[in-house]
Image (cartoon, rainbow, N blue to C red):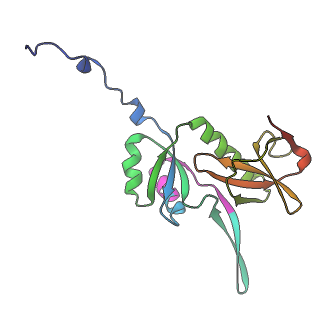
């Protein structure tokens, strides 16, 4: 058998674009390392997002407000497949989770960011898979979709990040909700 022919593999140009293009990843951080991971991304010049909310703590003689991660032990970063080892090497990432539906994650994180910036009370809540979906028709959250929750004479809409199976709830006027489906 002669080895003078060229294999089909040798003729195919290697495609490194998938390994070098940046995409969003979910990072499961080591406990209490969300802000350290965020600072690491800053130091490397990589895009990242750590949703935080203000949290008040009372100490004798004073009350302090600090930014608390909305999703404990999770943050989000945009980097290439080649950068994954460096992310693990930071010492702050326990796992790097691939995001299959980039557009869905970006849309959900955008809703969470706008809800946090709205000034409305935002707090963690359980991720719900049952309940009625609704769309907000008025106010700062107009166009958002989520699950309606009622309790303590208040109506809230649940905004979810499916990749994390985590949710946040925002108090809303029930007149501003339109049922879906």
Say whether residue 50 is magenta. yes
Relative to 105, residue 66 above or below: below
The magenta region covers: 38-53
Q: Residue furthest right?
A: 175
Position of the C terminus, as image quadrant, is top right
How far across and down, in percent of the image, does residue 93 sit? 45, 57
Q: Nearer the viewer, residue 136 or 19?
A: 136
How far across and down, in percent of the image, does residue 32 sit? 53, 66
Q: Residue furthest left?
A: 1
Count of marks placed on residues: 0
Q: Quadrant of residue 133?
A: top right
Q: Nearer the viewer, residue 22 or 137?
A: 137
Relative to 87, residue 142 above or below: above
Residue lying at 38% horizontally and 51% vertically, measured from the top left: 86
Residue lying at 50% horizontally and 55% vertically, measured from the top left: 28
Residue lying at 58% horizontally and 50% vertically, measured from the top left: 164
Position of the N terminus, as image quadrant, is top left
Q: Residue furthest front?
A: 130
How far across and down, in percent of the image, does residue 90 sit? 40, 58
Q: Quadrant of residue 105?
A: top right
Say whether residue 64 is magenta. no
How far across and down, in percent of the image, does residue 166 sit? 63, 53
């Amino acid at each position: 058998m002669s080895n003078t022919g060229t294999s089909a593999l040798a003729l195919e140009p290697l495609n490194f674009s998938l390994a070098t293009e940046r995409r969003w990843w979910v990072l499961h951080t080591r406990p209490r390392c969300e802000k350290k991971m965020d600072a690491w991304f800053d130091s490397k010049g990589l895009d990242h997002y750590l949703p935080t909310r203000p949290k008040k703590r009372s100490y004798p003689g004073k009350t302090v407000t600090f930014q608390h991660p909305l999703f404990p032990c999770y943050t989000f970063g945009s980097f290439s497949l080649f950068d994954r080892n460096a992310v693990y090497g930071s010492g702050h990432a326990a796992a790097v989770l691939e995001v299959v539906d980039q557009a869905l994650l970006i849309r959900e994180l955008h809703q969470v960011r706008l809800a946090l910036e709205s000034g409305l009370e935002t707090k963690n809540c359980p991720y719900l898979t049952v309940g009625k979906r609704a769309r907000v028709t008025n106010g700062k959250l107009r166009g958002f979709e989520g699950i309606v929750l009622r309790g303590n004479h208040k109506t809230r809409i649940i905004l979810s990040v499916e990749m994390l199976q985590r949710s946040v709830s925002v108090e809303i006027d029930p007149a501003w909700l339109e049922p879906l489906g």
